[in-house]
Image (cartoon, grey):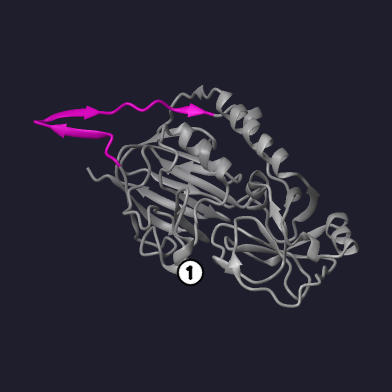
Amino acid sequence: MQSKFKVVHPGVHSLIQDNGRVGFAHLGVTTGGVADKQAYYWLNRMLQNEQNAACIEITFGGLKLHSLCEQVICLTGADMPLTINGQLQRNWCSHQVKSGDVIAVGYAKSGLRSYFGVHRGFKFEPQFGSCSTVVREQLGGLNGQALKVGDELGCDLLSTITNGEKKTTHVKCFALGVMDIPRYHQTVTIRVVLGYQYQAFEKNERDVFFNNEYLVSKQFDRMGYRLHGVQIHSNVQALKSEGICYGAIQIPPDGQPIILLNDRQTLGGYPKLGSIFSLDGDKLAQCGQGAKINFVEITAEHAKQLLIEAQSQRQSIQLKRFQPSSG
């Protein structure tokens, strides 16, 4: 018995991801990592994984895998239909599969990105401390590339045979309560922590930003989201390049905001209004072209308090035991 899954169809864009790389920006290495950390958190909790287990981030959908082992799987994030051997299964809960099963993930009905994982995660050699795939830098995952037909994804064996005797590691299956499952919308309010360059924008320009709705343009990916709406201009004529954090809101010369995300470049020279609240970044990552974005200001202190409260609330949620199904 082999401990792996084989890619039958890679879908539109499927990448190996974990929490990403931290501490290598001075080398020009971006963080990468899962775009929706909330969905990834629940994936690992339902699979009883450590919180940095490698998974597949599926954008738009269309992934199909052939299981060559006994394992426990789970799908969270965007609403993409999950089937095992053609039988529809619940998302946001774990399922047992066996060797020979075919697992298919359909296309998103709401949201944009889903997360598929196995017990103890997929096994890849970390690069700069992470298995996350950054295609632009050809780092992580399988040779720094998106999944393709025939790729093999290693994982732990749940069953072994020693001296003719089969020993199986029994893994419980869990489900997240329906009321606790995140909902994804195409109209999102993003909270913004103002940055030190905020004063480089006249008051009327700041008012334009906070009092108008912006649309996600066709130029959006894991590197950043370019928005379209009323133009904004700054008084900055020249700016030296500097390090850029997750969620930075850049205003380029055309006046259309760009929100930088996981695969952002490490340096940038456009003036910045501030940065988005990290929890709202998860919501933004589930938006596609045409989604409506509004902005409101939040202080750094308030954002920190809200983050602590959200983490505490999340940890207090109890998963439910789920009767395992097998394809």
Badge 1 is on which residue?
A: 136
The residue drawn where x is 54% and y is 35% is: 92
Q: Is residue 239 above or below residue 171?
A: below
Q: Nearer the viewer, residue 310 or 245?
A: 245
Measured as percent of width and height from the top left, residue 175 is found at 52, 28
The residue drawn where x is 57% and y is 23% is: 316
Q: Nearer the viewer, residue 238 or 73?
A: 238
Measured as percent of width and height from the top left, residue 279 is found at 65, 43
Q: Nearer the viewer, residue 226 or 94?
A: 226
In this picture, which residue range is highlighted in magenta?
156-175
Q: Is residue 253 above or below residue 140?
A: below
Q: Residues within 10 Å of mark 1 (few under 14, many from 20)?
A: few
Residue 136 on the magenta span: no
Determine whether, in the image, residue 261 is placed left or right of residue 291: left
Q: Quadrant of the C terminus?
A: top left
Residue 177 found in image quarter: top right
Q: Is residue 16 above or below residue 309?
A: below
The residue drawn where x is 39% and y is 56% is: 8
Q: Quadrant of the N terminus?
A: top left
